[in-house]
Image: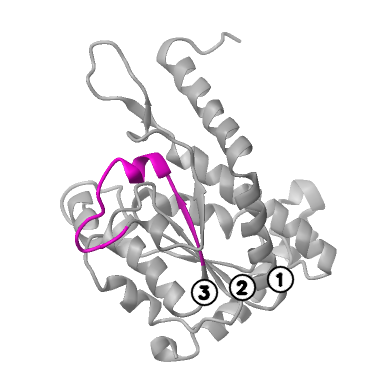
Amino acid sequence: MSPAVGAAATWLREAAAVLGRVTETQAEGIETASRWCADAIAADGLVHLFGTGHSRIPVEEMFPRYGSYPGFNPIVELSMTFHTQVVGANGQRQAMFIERVPGLAEVILSNFHFGPLDVMMVFSASGLTAVPVEMARGARSRGLRVIAVTSVAQSMSGEPEPAAGARLLEEADLVLDVCTPHADAMVTIGGLDSPVGPGSTIGAVAIVNAIKVRTAELLVERGAMPPVITRASAVGTERSRTLFDQAYREHARRLARAIDKQGGE
């Protein structure tokens, strides 16, 4: 098989470099985040995950999918994450407008009743827009420990929008850096004045999977590991079906308590 050449090879090298920087610089933060997640899940609580725009991707990476387990609660709003129509109804312009609307995060948070050890993980590469910043701020005001997964370089290269009033990384108890450049895109091509090939998703997905597996390790040590969604090729058809059913039932049980009281009280 021929090796990747040109800009394709450059992007692959840059993506590997992102993973290397995450490994070298974020290990301590990943360990802290994993312990917080294990504390929450072992206490019958939840780790809530929120992202807008393409930051929906690491949210979905955590649960539900193969190799994942209950205890992680994905929170996304279709109005800010539904991009495939691009223009027209449900278009990207509307999504980008909505994620800058102050006060919306409080409306979202008001749908949930949070446990004493619950954690909120907020994803935003720039961390400069109102909704993710206010999501972190609102979660902290409710007593949750907040983890921000963001690009520090990207965030520090711009100013927070007035409606946000701060950067996401300033509203978190723990900051995990996806280790991407300020432009996000990582490849410069001769004759083109704009870089291409973003890297923040690679960094964010690596971080959350590292947290997922370390949290599982900690939960197994405590005898508190929930069922894992697993392919039939790994455990057989019947066992796979059983694990799916058990995982969904367990997620429903935990989530029912989180939404059983209106107004977040």
Q: Earlier in the sequence, mark 2 or mark 1?
A: 1
**Looking at the rendering, in which quadrant would you find the C terminus?**
bottom left
- Give the residue number, with chain letter if any, for mark 2: 251
Residue 208 vertical placement versus 188 (above, below): below
Give the amino acid type for the residue marked by disc 3 in the picture. Leu
Q: CA distance from mark 2 to mark 3?
A: 20 Å
- Give the residue number, with chain letter if any, for mark 1: 246
Residue 229 vertical placement versus 234 (above, below): below
Indicate which label's residue lies in the foreground, 1 or 3: 3
Give the amino acid type for the residue marked by disc 1 in the picture. Gln
Q: Is 132 a magenta residue?
A: no
Labels 2 & 3 near each other (Cβ < 8 A): no
Q: Residue at x 64, y 67 (%)?
A: 70
Residues drawn in magenta: 146-166
Q: Position of residue 82 (x, y in %)?
A: 32, 55
What SS does tag 2 mark? helix
